[in-house]
Amino acid sequence: MPLLTAPESRGEHRSSFFSNRFANARACALIASATLTCFAATSQGRADNSNADFEKWQTGRKPDFALRDIDDKVLRLSSLRGRIVFLHFFATWCEPCRDELPALDRLVARDQSRKIFVIAISVAEVPERVRRFFEKEKLALNFPVLLDQDRATTRTWGVQILPSTIVLDSKLSPRLIVASDYAWDNLDISKLLTRLSNTQNQSIDPKREIVSYDRQPQRRPK
């Protein structure tokens, strides 16, 4: 079940707002079982989701990875041991994905435990496209946006629907997955942490510094 790339990378030309929305809708529709997820998010509004919408992870541990972010800095997953990591797979052309990025930023801001660390992973998009998106939307997120241009990490983690979010415990073991958009503003953080507590044996320093990621693109030298 192949994961679809952005419409532009398939050579499609979109000359109007209508054709752009049609291409996005068609892209979502071609991802198996994601059709209702995409259309529910765009035409009916979000459901009042809760922790029950998370499914238990079934496929065991996955290998470590290292990806570059849109500012060309490298982040390795294993460096985040001791944190609760949200791996959020998205694409800038996927309309439900666009709303989730600021919602995830708000989730991090209201996490008083400072245990949650979000990693957004752009799937099969070139860096300049992703930079333009953040510049146009004026998004400044306090978490990294990594680039999985060849989809190797996405395939390894078995992601076939966008958006998808995988929750890792403090030992970086995958525990939960939601293969759809999610109402992150409604997530009860304390309940989620309690749900993960069976494997959270490592102490986490609440004063540990959190890197702030400025999503404004860097100016390139002329």
Image: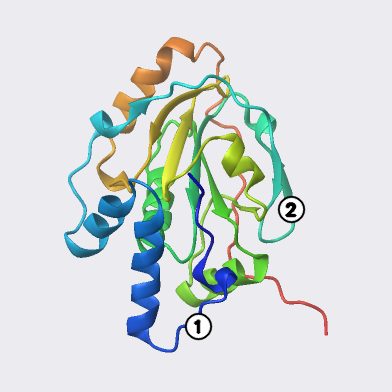
Q: Amino acid at mark 1?
A: His
Q: Is residue 216 visible?
A: no
Give the SS element for disc 1.
loop
Q: In the image, 129: left or right of 174?
A: right
Q: Report if the CB atoms under discs 2 and 1 are less than 8 Å apart.
A: no
Rendering coords of residue 145 (x, y %):
58, 54
Residue drawn 49% across and 15% down? 200
Residue picked out by circle 1: 13
Residue 77 lies, with reference to residue 45, above or below; the image says above
Check the image and report above or below for 217 versus 141. Answer: below
User: What is the secondary structure assignment of the residue under circle 2?
Assistant: loop
The three-letter amino acid code for the residue at tag 2 is Lys
Which residue is label 2 attached to? 73
Q: Give the percent coordinates (x, y) of residue 201.
A: 52, 11
Picture quarter with the C terminus: bottom right
Vertical order, 168 against 17 (above or below): above
- Of the image marks 2 and 1, the number of the one nearer the N terminus: 1
Residue neighbourhood size for the residue with mark 2, other residues' Cα within 10 Å, grouped as few (<14), some (14–19), many (≥20): few
